[in-house]
Amino acid sequence: MISAMTIIREARLRPEYSHLYPEIEAGTWLPASEVGATILMTQLRAVHPKRLGDRLLPDHHFDFRGGQMRGGATELRTRDGESGFSLEH
């Protein structure tokens, strides 16, 4: 059985990058989907949006926990290009 804690991926902004994301409180664990949505909404509202990189939440700007770690066998999809998630077992 898959618990909610294994499915929910959380992200925490590293303090040294807080100036890049003033809308996100550094050092606080939040659902990664919420952090991503906040960044996207900020981009949509910005008069001069900043250029986003290959990843919406860069590994060197954020710490992650929960979900499944990349590199291991999993049915959970935590990032684009990884295998899909199925609730049918």
Image (cartoon, helix red, strand yellow):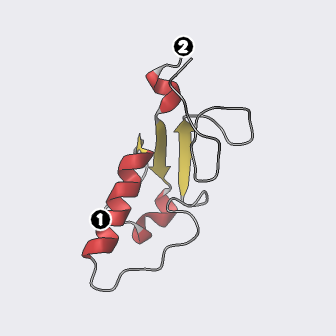
What is the number of the mark on residue 41? 1
Is the residue 86 above or below the residue 89 in the image? Answer: below
Is residue 22 visible in this depiction of the protein?
A: no
CA separation, marks 2 and 1? Answer: 34 Å
Is the residue 21 above or below the residue 10 in the image? Answer: below
Is the residue 85 above or below the residue 36 in the image? Answer: above
Q: Quadrant of residue 44?
A: bottom left
Q: Nearer the viewer, residue 31 or 21?
A: 31
70 sits to left or right of 27: right
Residue visible at 27% across and 85% down in the picture: 47
84 sits to left or right of 31: right
> Mark 2 = which residue?
1
Q: Nearer the viewer, residue 49 or 1?
A: 1
Other-residue count near label 2 (Cα within 10 Å), few / some / many at <14 / 14–19 / ≥20: few
Quadrant showing the N terminus = top right
Residue visible at 41% across and 47% down in the picture: 33
Q: Nearer the viewer, mark 2 or mark 1?
A: 2
Residue visible at 56% across and 61% down in the picture: 58
Secondary structure beneath label 1:
helix
How far from the left and from the top, in percent, is residue 11? 48, 46
